[in-house]
Amino acid sequence: MKARNTRRTAGRPVAIALAVSVSALSLTACGDDGSDDTAVQKGNDITVGLLLPDRDTARFEKFDYPLIRDEVASLTEKKGKVRYANAEASVSRQSAQFQKMIDDKVDVILVDALNSKKIASDVRKAKDAGIPVIAYDRLAEGPIDAYVSHDNELVGQVQGRAIMSELGEKSQNDKVVMMNGDPGDPNTARFKDGALSELQGQVDIVKQYDTKEWKPSIAKANMEKAIQAYGLNNIAAVYSANDGMAGAVIEAMKEAGATKMPPVTGQDANLDAVQRVVSGEQYMTVYKSFLLEATNAAKIAVAKVQGRQIEFAALTRETVDSPTAKNVPAMLVPVVALTKDNIKETVITDGVYTVKDICTSKYKADCAAIGLE
């Protein structure tokens, strides 16, 4: 995937990006004469099909689905609805769910593809049936109409920079293990490329593992292999592409006898990962605003169905290339490195979690130590 006109905004407050998005929509919602000159194809009584990939990634069930559902309702005077299916990490199940959406004649499909290549035939079937398809979070192949995600190479860069910041300048001999995601996920390569742009040549990357379907159990088994091969005390840092695997990596090191963890990265700001950051077990996670990604995906889907091209264009001001499509309209929302220092300014300010959610009895003392009370 190649993104153009992408402004890298790591660390920029999410509220600013949201204001920009809302402002762009307000300014471009009508033509020069103050009226929308694009014919409306559908009214508010629409059905958005939503296909999410798994339940292991906590954000999908807890945030993405309800945010999209509620935004569609808000945009359609509560007449629009979301038909939701979760593939539970099965490519064949996701394909069957996709076909069911087509058979049920939903008006638009938002899909977070488990396998970007294999989903292409399903995307083609939907297009042949006159149903627009929007790739969500991961760039699907095939004739998609739009893509909503984050700057995924930047995600990896943010993770890599965090490791380098913690290891310091004299790190050329420091041994780093890379726990990459599922090779069938198109984002995996982008995360990896971003991380390598920061790590390669600066540290000794002793082992890289791909993790089928992002399964924590596989990540744990691979971390056990790395510990056996290089020794627990010789591993200076672990690049973990997401929080689920980070938890598994940390568990493997604990079982091997670790009492103090080397820096371990993550992604998604899962609640247990944020708690691990508070306690010092996990060094950082990448916070990707669920609010921005999900609500804007809903806006794009509804605008596309209702034929409001002006709003659609305002929301998708960037373009990306996939192996099968060029210049796909895209919205890439910002990412933030979440550490002990900015928990209040990120997930708490955005209402993802409360202090009470994070600072349970187990983490109360750790929260107090960083002023999170």
Image (tube, rainbow, N blue to C red):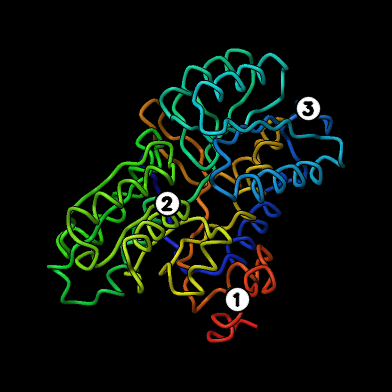
Query: In front here: 75 or 69?
Result: 69
Which label number is shown at residue 42?
3
Residue 24: x and y in percent read: 63, 55
Please name the residue that numbered disc 2 is placed on: 245
Q: Nearer the viewer, mark 3 or mark 1?
A: 1
Badge 3 marks a residue whose secondary structure is loop
Identity of the residue drawn at 47% across and 35% down? 328
**Mark 2 crowd level (few <14, some 14–19, many ≥20, 10 Å Cα):** many
Give the Cα separation between the discs numbered 2 and 3.
Answer: 42 Å
Question: Which is more N-terminal, label 3 or label 2?
Answer: 3
Residue 60 at x, y = what percent?
A: 61, 45
Disc number placed over residue 344 in the picture, else none: 1
- Residue 154 visible at all: no
Circle 2/circle 1 CB separation < 8 Å? no
Q: CA distance from mark 3 to mark 1?
A: 41 Å
Q: Is residue 25 left or right of residue 157?
A: right
Quadrant of image for the C terminus: bottom right
Q: Residue at x 25, y 55 (%)?
A: 196
Q: Quadrant of the N terminus?
A: top left
- Earlier along the polypeptide chain: callout 2 or callout 1? 2
Q: Is residue 71 above or below residue 46?
A: below
Which picture quadrant has residue 14?
bottom right
Answer with the quarter of the image where residue 200 lies.
bottom left
Q: Secondary structure at mark 1?
A: helix
Secondary element at image label 2? helix
Is the residue marked by circle 3 packed among few (<14), some (14-19), or many (20+) residues within 10 Å? some
Q: Amino acid at mark 3?
A: Lys
Instruction: Count the numbered circles shown.
Output: 3
**Pointer 2 with pointer 3, Cβ within 8 A:** no
Q: Is residue 283 above or below residue 67?
A: below
